[in-house]
Structure formats: C-alpha cells, structure tokens
Image: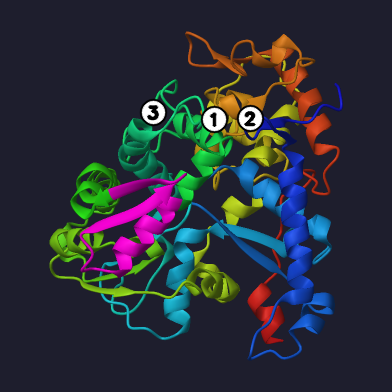
Amino acid sequence: MSAWQPIVQWSEQQRIPLRYFQILLKQLLLQLQSTATCGRLPDLHEIMRDRVYAVILGHPTAWSDTYVHNLREAVLASKIVNQAEQVMVIDQAIAPLFSLIHSHKPLQDNTLIINIGAETTDLLLAKVNNGIIGRSNLSSRGLDYAGLSLNQDIVVQLLYPHWRSLANPDRDACDLDRLLMPAPGDPAPGLRADLQKALISSPVGLELLNAAEQLKLDLSTHLDLDQWITTIRDRPLMVWRRELESQVIQPFLQHLNRALNDLLSNSGTIADEVMSVWKLGGTTNLPSLSRWLEQKMPNAEIASLPPSTVASGLATAPTYRYLLNISRQQYSDYFLLQEICRLNLQSAITPNQLMQQLQNRGVNSKSCRDRILTILQGDLPTGLFPWQEQEQSLFLSDPTLSSDLFTGRLFELESDGTYQPNWRKFQALRAYLKAILGTMQQSLSEPLVFPEFARSIAG
C-alpha cells in the first residue's frame, strides 16, 4: 500500500492534499488557545493552555463518521487534549436545545429548532412532556443546502444571466454555460461541487459570489428595498426582490418543507401541534422564510436565537449526557468495520451469528445493530473512498490501489439468506484501513469510553 494521500481539485488551477484541511483546522485551534477571549473568564488563556478537560464539537445532521474522525484527529494534533475520549463530536442540531435548557428558557410541547448555517440546514423537533425531555423524544433532519448554496443559486439564476448578456466573453472568463447546473433549492452535492470549483477559479466568479452574499444580506435587513443594484467589472446589475423570492427562495422552501414534513411525519406530529419555533442563522431573516414559518405552523410562537447559541449549547452538552447517543459515539462506523475485518470470516454467516461473534469480542452489538447490518448488506462508511462520493469530481483517486478493493460487495447474499464474505475484498480492505489509520493518532483497537464530563467538572 502506497503512502498516497487524497488530493482535492480545489479550483481549475489548484490541487490541495485533503490532509491540508485538517492541518488548517489544527492551526485554527492553536490560534484559539492564544487569542480566545471571554468577559466572564479573564484567565481564559491559562485555561486553554493547561486546564482543558474535554472538547465538544458539532457535526451537521447525518454527516458521516469520516468527517467526525477527521475533526477528532485535528483536535488531537493541536494537543489541546491528549486522548480521543476527551473529544466528543455530537449532532449540532441538538446544541441549540442544550442552550435553551441551560438558560432556563420555557420549552413548550413540540418545539422546533431550525438552524440555517453556511453549508447545512439542521432541524430538531423536541416533544416536551410536562417540561420533561428524553432522548427518544428528539428527532432531527439535515439538508445539505443552506447559505452558500443559496448564494450559488443567486449567481446562477439572477446575477450570471444578466452579467453574461453584458460581458465580453473574450475578456471576462467566467464560463458557466459548459456546466450542468443544479436545480434551485436542490442540494445536488456533486453538481454544486463542480459549480463552486468553476466560480472560485475565476475572478469574476468570486465577485459574483460576494455580490450574492451582499444581495441576500441587504434584502434580509432592508425590508423596504424592492430592488438591488451592484456593479461587476464596471457593468451594472439589478435584481428585483420578487425575482429573488420566486427563482431562489421558493425552490429552497419547497425542499425545506419536504424535510420538515418528513420530520413531523416520522415523529407522529402535525404542523398545527408545533407550539414554538426557534430559528437561527442569517438566512432565517429573509421575509419570505419568516412568512412560510408562520403559515406552516400557525399556532407556534416564533423567535430568533443569537449566533452564539450553537457554541454555548455544545459547551453545556456534558451536562445533558442523558440526551446524547453515547453508543453512537463509542462505536463509530470505522470501529465496527475494523472489528468485522478482525473476525477473519472464512465461511457464510447469518446476521445473528455476526452479531454474536462481535458480542464475543466485547462489542455491544445490540446498540449498533442497524449499522452492523448496513455493513453486512454492502454499504461501507461514507467517505471511506472520497473519489467515489457524489463530490467525486473534487478528488483524485489513488492509482496504486488494488482493484479488489472496488470489486463486488464485502458480503454476497446467498439464496439461503446467509452472507458469504468476499475474501479478496476483505484482504484489500484490511490493508487500506491499516494504511489510512496507521498515520493517525486515534486507535480503533477499543471502543471510545467517554468519561463522565459533568461529574468531573462538578467535582
């Protein structure tokens, strides 16, 4: 197995090793140690340097363990803490709820929290029973569409067509016409990766993205503004508010509405039963989104939360361990895959037999049965091979990898309901996992056992 590392085709002109992004995160964390300030903690620098017991990070709803694993690796590389068990990465959709509970905000029955960030939109529904919330009363959904995707759609639907009709194509190179464009409001990660790469490869593309962000901000804060005007390369562009709402915002709301309907349906709730809505993120200030929330949930009180809500919620998360899925933290998809590889299976096996063998190795297979079955049925962890994901055009594949790694499924379903291990694929996968994990500080030899953060802090 070679020492090759995944390469990102960041722009048309620039290639960057994927590990570089982890290094940047490490540097950001190191800067935090020396520059972070907090009025309530005048000795914060000393705390960050010598007394940090745990780090809690958030990840977008339904994002893969590959992302979580790399976040934890960056924290360990920064030396803020020394052990993987000191880094907990939780679904960021729940973080605002922790902040609300910690600040003693009253929670009504069926509380919805909607967070529209830069990359993702997170929805959390909390079914409160006489002020009591349990983990089984929480449901979350994620949508890989948010502020940056809105900016792309503003460029594609509004700014670029106007600019293209005025521009000199020989002088102003920003040719998006060669691309297959994502439909407005559609996450379409592969198409959006190609679009973003094209935009940031061109000075004009970067100007258009900046203009889109400013347009969104101005029409969110100046409610009396019906038209917006800017200049790109000495060419005036004008956008009407009604164009923004009909061509960009409404398609987004349709996708958001489907995600919300799915969340409500799966939790046995109807929109009229939602009594409170908390929203955060600059995009939630768009008037059309506020109107949609009022129409969708007519009985709900709607209020905004400050930008610091997610961070403060993550900081208080150890206090509410009973609301966290700890077993999901302990047994990552990579740990489960590694454990299955270590079984060295030679013959067909039933699902129950696989569960029992893992149980014999000390794995609480009952708590992660669904994810074990997912691997058994042929689905490997998302992001294990970046160049095979929807954003595959961003990544260059390793030409030295064995074809056995990509041939067939890990298990083949037999006619009698058993699963036959693919020996060659297992052999190649073991070597691949050894290569990528061998350079990391985290170990998959044991499940993560998180300490009782809250007890330690209280003590």
The quadrant the C terminus occupies is bottom right
Q: The disc labelled 2 sits on which kind of residue?
A: Pro
CB contact under 8 Å: marks 3 and 2: no
Counting residues from the N terminus, which is met first, the one under dot 1 or under dot 2?
2
| Nearest-to-viewer mark from 1 and 2 | 1
Residue 78 as seen in the image, left or right of residue 351: right
Asked whether 358 falls inside the magenta stretch, the response is no
**Residue 36: x and y, percent?**
70, 77
| Label 1 to label 2: alpha-carbon separation | 8 Å
The residue tagged 2 is 386
**Which residue is nearer to you in this view: 152 or 1?**
152
Give the secondary structure at mark 3: loop
| Label 3 to label 2: alpha-carbon separation | 22 Å
CB contact under 8 Å: marks 1 and 2: yes
**Residue 376: x and y, percent?**
56, 26
**Residue 147: x and y, percent?**
42, 53
Can see residue 302?
A: yes
The quadrant the N terminus occupies is top right
* Extent of the magenta region: 211-238
Q: Residue at x 47, y 76 (%)?
A: 99
**Residue 273: x and y, percent?**
17, 65
Give the secondary structure at mark 2: helix
Query: Is residue 83 depicted above or below 391 in this figure?
Result: below
The residue tagged 3 is 181
**Which residue is nearer to you in this view: 112 or 247?**
247
The residue tagged 1 is 391
Q: The disc labelled 3 sits on which kind of residue?
A: Met
